[in-house]
Image: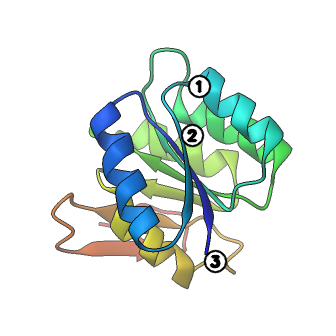
């Protein structure tokens, strides 16, 4: 199973993701801010890092860049309740294996496994209800 780092300043999101992924058998670490996340990234290798885009002390894109310098093989999932095209483009430009979620990480992690060997950006858009997920490996946002 995967070793996952969840980074979000909202406790409820951290708890939801931690419980969900632990139930699936994954090892999960939680960081409530960018500084804690950076300390954990320096001390451990994570298979998957799931990070909020907007946090008080850093952005998810900055954390993505930090993570890729330390562990280029880690998959990175950005989550947000307020997606923008600019943030998606910045994330794609930061890494060959970026995952983008508009609001819910769980369906995207499941989709990510399908594209794990891809060298192109993978974009996952999902609703929190998990009703439908759309992906593309073309590097462009799904329509």
Which of discs 1 and 2 lies nearer the camera? The answer is: 1
How many angstroms separate mark 1 from mark 2 (CA)? 18 Å
Secondary element under disc 2, as helix, strand or loop, is helix
Residue 78's place in the image compared with 99, above or below, is above
Residue under label 3, please give it.
116
Q: Is residue 29 visible?
A: yes
Tag 1: Cα neighbours inside 10 Å, few (<14), some, or many (≥20)? many
Task: Give the x, y percent position of residue 113.
Answer: 55, 79
Q: How is the image coloured?
A: rainbow
**Mark toward the start of the polypeptide (2 vs 3):** 2
Which of discs 2 and 3 lies nearer the camera? The answer is: 3
Q: Quadrant of the C terminus?
A: bottom left
**Mark toward the start of the polypeptide (1 vs 2):** 1
Q: Nearer the viewer, residue 86 or 76?
A: 76
Residue under label 1, please give it.
34
Residue that appears at 71% across and 37% down: 40
Residue that appears at 21% across and 68% down: 130
- The reply to whether callout 1 and callout 2 are in contact (CB within 8 Å) is no
- The reply to whether callout 2 and callout 3 are in contact (CB within 8 Å) is no
Residue 79's place in the image compared with 130, above or below, is above
- The reply to whether callout 3 and callout 1 are in contact (CB within 8 Å) is no
Task: Give the x, y percent position of residue 68.
Answer: 76, 47
Residue 21 appears left or right of 39: left
Secondary element under disc 3, as helix, strand or loop, is loop
Quarter of the image where one finds residue 64:
top right
Residue under label 2, please give it.
90
Tag 2: Cα neighbours inside 10 Å, few (<14), some, or many (≥20)? few
Q: Quadrant of the N terminus?
A: bottom right
Task: Give the x, y percent position of residue 62.
Answer: 63, 30
How many angstroms separate mark 2 from mark 3 (CA)? 20 Å
């Amino acid at each position: 199973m995967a070793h996952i780092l969840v980074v979000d300043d909202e406790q409820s999101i951290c708890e939801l993701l931690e419980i969900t992924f632990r139930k699936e058998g994954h090892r999960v670490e939680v960081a409530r801010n960018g500084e804690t996340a950076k300390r954990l990234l320096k001390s451990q290798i994570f298979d998957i890092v799931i990070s909020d885009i907007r946090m008080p002390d850093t952005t998810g894109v900055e954390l993505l860049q930090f993570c890729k310098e330390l562990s280029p093989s880690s998959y990175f999932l950005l989550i947000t309740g307020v997606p923008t095209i600019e943030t998606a483009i910045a994330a794609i430009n930061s890494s060959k294996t970026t995952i983008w979620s508009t609001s819910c990480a769980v369906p995207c992690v499941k989709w990510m496994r399908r594209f794990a060997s891809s060298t192109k950006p993978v974009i996952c858009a999902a609703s929190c209800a998990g009703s439908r997920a759309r992906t593309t490996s073309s590097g462009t946002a799904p329509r």
